[in-house]
Amino acid sequence: MSDSTATPLPSGITGVGAGGDSLTVDLNQQFDLANMAFIGLAGVLVWIMIPGVGLLYSGLSRKKHALSLLWASMMAIAVVSFQWFFIGYSLTFSHSVKSEFIGSLQFIGLRNVLGAPSVVSSLPDIVFCFFQGMFACITGCLMIGGACERARLGPMMVFLFVWITIVYCPIACWTWNPEGWLAKLGGLDYAGGGPVHITSGHGALMYALILGKRNDPVAGKGLPKYKPHSVTSVVLGTVFLWFGWFGFNGGSAGNTTIRAWYSNVNTNLAAASGSLAWLFVDYFRCGGKWTTVGLCSGAIAGLVGITPGAGFVPIWAAFIIGIVTAIGCNFAVDLKNLLRIDDGLDVYALHGVGGAIGCVMTGIFAADYVTATDGATFIAGGWINHNYVQVGYQLAGMCAIIGWTCVVTAAILLIQNQIPFLKLRLSPEEEELGTDAHQIGEFTYQEDMIYVPEPVRSKSINEVPQHQLIDDQIHTAEETSVEK
């Protein structure tokens, strides 16, 4: 039981925020506490997806780069959380938006972010800030997968901060801030098909393109071909992602109404149908093998595809979206060979292509009665409601997001690469040594057969050597294996 007399705060500190003085007014009274609890838990579930991405990426990589991808997932949480506190939330969800393109500096440093209703009026600013901050973190984590096995880690941190600020924040503002131009146009994006998946997928594509392909003398003029070094890590990462996606999509309702749980049923069904679709496609394309990586890839493709429509489409449509997205993403994996872009973790195929498919199919299957299950959201629907212009809105938003992401991401990378201490890529010798050894000095595995000393040619063998990570005896099974 609290005292009836408030203890004065130290000089210069007040309890006054945009929602009023917390010392004299109970700021919680204007909100439903169950909604706040649900969205807070959903944000925690989205957080666990980020190390899940790290496990997935790490398992798909080679041993000598495995730790760097786990490192990158945790780094993304730290860098983007700071960016979100400092400027990101204000640029995306400020109440006083000066234009339809980007927010203001109203909440810089989270100044006055307390108990005022957010742009989602069912939640206070501080709760909405936490939840949406997790979306920014996972978007950044997905995007840096395009740099796998060849990027310098210090410049990666700088690039991620800048990219979130001038690529992610404007696109999220367009889409989710009620004053954003895409929201006013009528585009539908429930949980991030555009801001999260299309943006991260095409950002990763630009990162991979500008870095160039990995050094591999065996590959010749083609792209390097490696098998995942740990399918167990791939499965564990997929488990974290599938589990966390219930917070990702369920929490995007902004409350704990029927619509939130309806979107979770859609989420689970799309993931299940996507995993089966990819599995069967791989069975016929890969010589009659029921591949575990294919099963996991299909689940992720289905989750990506349903993200923009989970709270808009009927349940039967989620089944179709999961299948179509998984098949589309499966064949999109081959695009990297046609484009000669070394996207070794297939971020573009899964997220860039998958998000685009999901956005268009949302325009086809969006149903007015689904959104009305939250008691407050009413839309004209998509093609199934005879609102045929909706697909046009979806395509307009998709093209704008792709164009902005590709042009601005490429500009950031090209400019940064001209700054000597911010060069993007490891040298061939550093890359051969491995990102873990050269950039971190720590390793995921410590077995003697994996890490062996390599003497420096210009010094005697008795001097302190660098450590060369030998990945399956160097250029043997992994480098000559047949790609999926």
Image (cartoon, rainbow, N blue to C red):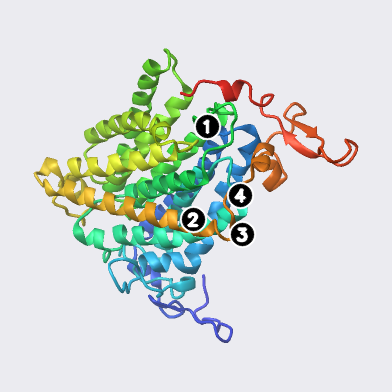
Q: Distance between the residues labelled 3 and 1?
A: 36 Å
* Left or right of residue 459: residue 212: left
Q: Mark 3 or mark 4, which is nearer to you?
A: 3
Q: Mark 1 or mark 2, which is nearer to you?
A: 2
As shown in the figure, which amino acid type bears the numbered disc 3?
Answer: Pro
Q: According to the image, label 1 marks what residue? A: 234
Q: Dot 2, crowdedness within 10 Å: few (<14), some or many (≥20)?
A: some
* Left or right of residue 467: residue 411: left
Q: According to the image, label 3 marks what residue? A: 420
As shown in the figure, which amino acid type bears the numbered disc 1?
Answer: Val
Q: Dot 3, crowdedness within 10 Å: few (<14), some or many (≥20)?
A: few
Q: What element carries label 1?
A: helix
Is residue 124 visible from the viewing direction of this image?
no
Q: Which of 331 and 139 is in front in this view?
A: 331
Q: Mark 3 or mark 1, which is nearer to you?
A: 3
Is residue 67 visible from the viewing direction of this image?
yes
Residue 395 screen position, x and y as percent:
22, 48
Q: How far apart are marks 1 and 4 (CA)?
A: 24 Å
Look at the picture and state if 245 lies above or below 30: above
Q: Is mark 4 on a helix, strand or loop?
A: loop
Q: According to the image, label 4 marks what residue? A: 152
Whether the residues at callouts 2 and 3 have beta carbons within 8 Å, the answer is no
Q: According to the image, label 2 marks what residue? A: 414
Q: Which of marks 3 and 4 is nearer the N terminus?
A: 4
